[in-house]
Amino acid sequence: MALRLLPKTLIRSVVVSGERSSLRGLSSASSAVRECLLNVPETKVTTLDNGFRVASEDSGLPTATVGVWIDAGSRYENDRNNGVAHFLEHMAFKGTGKRSQTQLELEVENMGAHLNAYTSREQTVYYARCFNNDVEKAVEILADILRNSKLGEAEIERERGVILREMQEVEQNLQEVVFDHLHASAFQHTPLARTILGPSENIQSIQRSDLQEYVQDHYKPPRMVLAGAGGVEHGRLVELANKYFGDMRSDYPRQSPSLEGCRFTGSEIRFRNDNMPFVYGAIAVEGVGWDHPDNIPLMIANTLIGQWDRSHGSGVNAPSRLAQRVGWGGRTQSFQSFNTCYKDTGLWGIYFVCNVDAVEDLSWNIQSEW
């Protein structure tokens, strides 16, 4: 396994002018893009009096997806409680003051809906997919699990074992392992260096009071967004947000959470295991935050570099030039470019799998293509 981070590089977009006929084609393409954008649903955003935001795109479909995005992830934790945000996500579906776990599962199932959640380094997300006629029911269920979860002691102990088993599964997923080490190397001694699941000793010691404290500190209206897409009418979604989240208080019992800056540190980590047939690694440079103007050029560059797998039917005829370079000889198994964004920084690079004797050659080709 190899990880390599390079000093931050500057990536520029280049426009090459051609003959007059080519420019006419470019103008025609621009017109096609403008026509296409006319068919994209408008994103509408409304902020309630307590700071809770509502965002939606109404495409008139018979189904809809609604969810609550919360500024609460491993970046907002410390060494003592690292893993609590993910632990809390696991507890969300274990029963509320209004519904038991079984009642919740039956209600969602009888709606023909899908209820799920995930935790990242900066966000915790709870969302539901349902028919557009059931949007209010879905929003009410989301509000119930977010505001009234019982966090029972028996359920906490049961989920403690579930999360520890999940950690063992993640350790078998070498791509997950590489990206955890990549963050630990790139953002040393900062919150982004921590894993989302946290260390096992934290999972074994987290108590109900830790979960309650995290909810009180982070599950606040200014840090929450109710987002909907599909068959969702914005005015109706705002009404539902007012009905189920409008009475939430935005004051903090303790100090208001602040976002600690994360310093990028170019470095390299290598773990050697001669029993493994391949090298699993990543090369990355510092990227940019979500709202940085360079983010769109980086997304385009990420798409141009592309991805490739030896098992794909395209073989060396893949559109990615990097695939054409490294596809011969059978020493590279796969690669996948990525653009991971956070609020104020990011990682832009490539994850790869190759033979041991191909690491230096593949690294050279990647950097040459960049």
Image (tube, grey):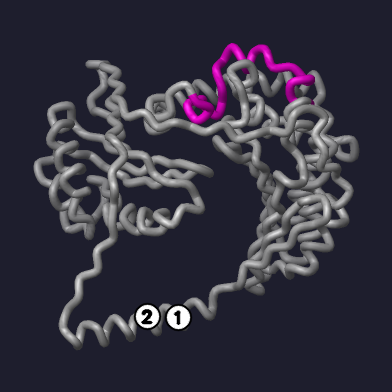
Q: Nearer the viewer, residue 178 or 328?
A: 178
Asked if disc 2 and disc 1 are in contact, CB closer than 8 Å, the reply is yes
Name which residue lies at 80% across and 37% down: 102
Bounds of the magenta span? 190-212
Which residue bears the numbered disc 1? 34
Name which residue lies at 24% across and 63% down: 14
Percent position of residue 276, x then y: 26, 21
Percent position of residue 174, x then y: 37, 29
Which amino acid does the dot numbered 2 rest on? Ser
Question: Residue 192 in magenta?
Answer: yes
Residue 153 is drawn in which quadrant?
Answer: top right
Query: Is residue 365 depicted above or below 355 in this figure?
Result: below
Which residue bears the numbered disc 2? 30
Name which residue lies at 67% across and 67% down: 44
Residue 179 visible (yes or no): no
Q: Is 155 on the left-hand or right-hand side of 36?
A: right
Query: Is residue 324 depicted above or below 195 in this figure?
Result: below
Residue neighbourhood size for the residue with mark 2, other residues' Cα within 10 Å, grouped as few (<14), some (14–19), many (≥20): few
Residue 36 visible (yes or no): yes
Percent position of residue 120, x then y: 56, 37
User: What is the secondary structure assignment of the residue under circle 2?
Assistant: helix
Main SS, magenta region, reads: helix
Name which residue lies at 26% across and 87% down: 24
Residue neighbourhood size for the residue with mark 1, other residues' Cα within 10 Å, grouped as few (<14), some (14–19), many (≥20): few
Which amino acid does the dot numbered 1 rest on? Arg
Residue 155 is drawn in which quadrant?
Answer: top right
Q: Is 100 on the left-hand or right-hand side of 269?
A: right
